[in-house]
């Protein structure tokens, strides 16, 4: 029963539930303003790790007679370059999604594989923090969409759950059929998200606590990718959260049925 358990926790607290409709009702001029903001934000976000790498490279050069310092600085260089890599990858993912170029890659995707791959993506970090990632997936669920995009979406949710959870806690990932939709739920017992931030966390580069996000390597892009993937697959994303209690994210995707498959082929 982790499915029932998760839903039992969600149900009594519907006042805290924010439904993010995966629809873009923005007018053309607003889209243009958002694009300009995005470019400005990207430049700013890229400058931070690049600046840090420059300083660290200088520090390594100066510390060449102190092997311990060299090891320490190169370790931090590695962290910054990993952060930079992740940021660039997410920017590429997001711009692909916005341009809708990947839609011809769409196909039928098995939900159990999607969940297994997403958990695998965070397995090393979960192990390091002694976090148990428990899955409960209804068999034979299918959704339709771009495989890589769907993978990125579920992986981002699991990665966040692990990142924002304390050591030795539990993350539950479930997938079930609810009516005509597949619900993929990622529930954690982590730090939670204050109510006033809940409807903003899906914005690009929005972070509840930027200082903390920096130390966790967060980019603020993960959830905007999730939102875009949900939208381009005809679904939506929901979040319930309570500070100090934890968070539950639900990715709702239209179920792909065998009947429909036969009709269209
Ligand atoms: P980031 O790369 O910073 O995690 P996201 O777009 O994935 O960016 O998330 C935006 C912000 O939402 C995060 O910085 C964090 O403050 C908050 N957040 C996301 N997921 C969780 C979670 N499971 N628990 C607590 N806070 C979360």
Image: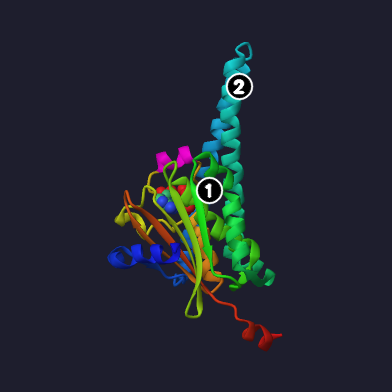
Magenta-colored segment: predominant secondary structure: helix
**Mark 1 nearby-residue class (10 Å; few <14, some 14–19, many ≥20):** some
Question: Is 240 on the left-hand or right-hand side of 57?
Answer: left
- The one nearer the camera, 81 or 188, is 188
- The one nearer the camera, 133 or 108, is 133
Residue 186 rendering spot, x and y as whole percentages:
47, 59
Q: Which residues are magenta?
A: 210-216
CB contact under 8 Å: marks 2 and 1? no
Residue 57 rendering spot, x and y as whole percentages:
61, 25
Residue at position x 48%, y 51% from top? Answer: 160
Q: Nearer the viewer, mark 2 or mark 1?
A: 2
Sequence order check: which comes first, mark 2 or mark 1?
Answer: 1
Residue at position x 49%, y 59% from top? Answer: 173
- The colour mode here is rainbow
Question: Is 200 on the left-hand or right-hand side of 111?
Answer: left
Residue at position x 57%, y 64% from top? Answer: 98
Q: Is residue 195 depicted above or below 76 in this figure?
A: below
- The answer to whether residue 207 is seen in the rendering is no
Quarter-of-image position of residue 99: bottom right
Q: Disc 2 marks which residue?
A: 71
Residue at position x 48%, y 48% from top? Answer: 162
Q: For the residue with label 1, is its CB less than 8 Å from the closest atom of ligand 1?
A: no
- The answer to whether residue 210 is seen in the rendering is yes
Q: Quadrant of the N terminus?
A: bottom left
- Asked whether 123 falls inside the magenta stretch, the response is no
Q: Disc 1 marks which residue?
A: 42
**Mark 2 nearby-residue class (10 Å; few <14, some 14–19, many ≥20):** few
Quarter-of-image position of residue 155: bottom right
Helix, strand or loop under label 2:
helix
């Amino acid at each position: 029963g982790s499915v029932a358990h998760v839903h039992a926790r969600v149900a009594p607290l519907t006042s805290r539930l924010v439904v993010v409709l995966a629809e873009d009702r923005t007018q053309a001029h607003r889209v243009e303003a958002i694009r300009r903001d995005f470019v400005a934000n990207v430049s700013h976000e890229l400058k931070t790790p690049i600046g840090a790498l420059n300083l660290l490279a200088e520090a390594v050069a100066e510390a060449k007679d102190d092997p311990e310092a060299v090891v320490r600085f190169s370790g931090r260089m590695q962290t910054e370059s990993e952060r930079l890599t992740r940021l660039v990858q997410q920017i590429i993912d997001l711009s692909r999604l916005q341009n809708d170029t990947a839609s011809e890659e769409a196909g039928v995707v098995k939900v159990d594989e999607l969940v297994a791959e997403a958990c695998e993506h965070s397995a090393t970090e979960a192990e390091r923090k002694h976090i148990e990632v428990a899955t409960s997936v209804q068999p034979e669920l299918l959704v339709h969409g771009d495989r890589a995009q769907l993978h990125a979406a579920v992986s981002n949710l699991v990665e966040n759950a692990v990142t924002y959870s304390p050591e030795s806690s539990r993350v539950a990932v479930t997938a079930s059929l609810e009516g005509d939709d597949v619900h993929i739920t990622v529930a954690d017992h982590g730090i939670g998200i204050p109510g006033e931030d809940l409807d903003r966390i899906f914005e690009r580069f929005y972070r509840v606590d930027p200082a903390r996000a920096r130390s966790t390597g967060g980019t603020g892009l993960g959830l905007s990718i999730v939102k875009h993937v949900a939208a381009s697959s005809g679904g939506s994303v929901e979040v319930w959260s309570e500070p100090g209690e934890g968070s539950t994210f639900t990715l709702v995707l239209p179920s792909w049925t065998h009947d429909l498959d036969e009709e269209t082929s």
